[in-house]
Image (spheres, rainbow, N blue to C red):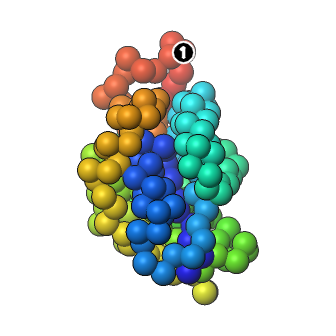
Amino acid sequence: MKLVLVSCCAPCSAGAIKQLADGCIPDVDDFVVMFFNPNIFPESEYQKRMREQIRYCEKMGVKHVELEYNHDAWRAAVRGMEAAPERGARCTACFEFRFARAFAWARENGYDAVASVLGVSRHKDQGQVDRAAASKCTDGVRYVPVKWDERLRVEIWRAADFYRQNYCGCEFSIRKVTALIPDGIQTA
């Protein structure tokens, strides 16, 4: 199986990447780590997370791809759900938007499966992520739900001294972390 691993950040993906690189996931012959996160706000935060993801992938010697940052398109996908709580309708729409692009990219580039670490964070619900991904499967590309080794993930990010954020990524998830919002940035 050729697999696309959808990643939100290095701290969340580190354990999964290690498991894949070590051959711990059955039937995976080849994989690439995909960073497609137009939900992340502000763009400077997106850049920090992307640099950490690239740094870890290069350290591990694994392939990676970074797709376009189009926050306006993401905002259109979640329009009307700005006030929804974390793990609510906005998160479902966000996951569906990102998975639709991931599945299309996988199909266009000869990959036959997609997996994700979008649900490993304490901010998210793995079941919600899995349902959103399954709803976006396309011809010839399937979703593979994987229960990643949480202990390994934590062990790696602690040792790696990754840049770590304390909110999911979008301006709506940052509401409770107002100290992180630079002066003058409108969040809603």
Q: Position of residue 184 (x, y in %)?
A: 54, 15
Total numbered badges shown on the rendered structure: 1
In the image shown, does 5 or 15 lie closer to the viewer?
A: 15
Query: Which quarter of the figure has residue 82?
Result: top left
In the image shown, does 187 or 119 lie closer to the viewer?
A: 119
Q: Position of residue 23 (x, y in %)?
A: 47, 69
Residue displayed at 60% across by 71% down: 30
In the rendered image of this protein, does residue 53 appear above or below residue 109?
Answer: above
- Residue 176 visible? The answer is yes
Give the quadrant of the N terminus: bottom right
Residue displayed at 51% across by 61% down: 21
Report the side of 181 relative to 98 (left or right): left
Residue displayed at 41% across by 69% down: 24
Report the side of 149 relative to 38 (left or right): left
- Residue type at the position of mark 1: Gly
Report the side of 134 relative to 140 (left or right): left
Mark 1, other Cα within 10 Å: few <14 / some 14–19 / many ≥20: few
Residue displayed at 32% across by 42% down: 155
Q: Residue furthest top?
A: 183
- Residue 100 visible? The answer is no
In the rendered image of this protein, does residue 37 appear above or below residue 137?
Answer: above
- Element class at badge 1: loop
Report the side of 118 relative to 113 (left or right): left
In the rendered image of this protein, does residue 105 appear above or below residue 67?
Answer: below
Q: Position of residue 110 (x, y in %)?
A: 70, 77
In the image shown, does 158 or 90 lie closer to the viewer?
A: 158
Give the residue number, with chain letter if any, for mark 1. Answer: 184
Q: Position of residue 163 (x, y in %)?
A: 46, 29
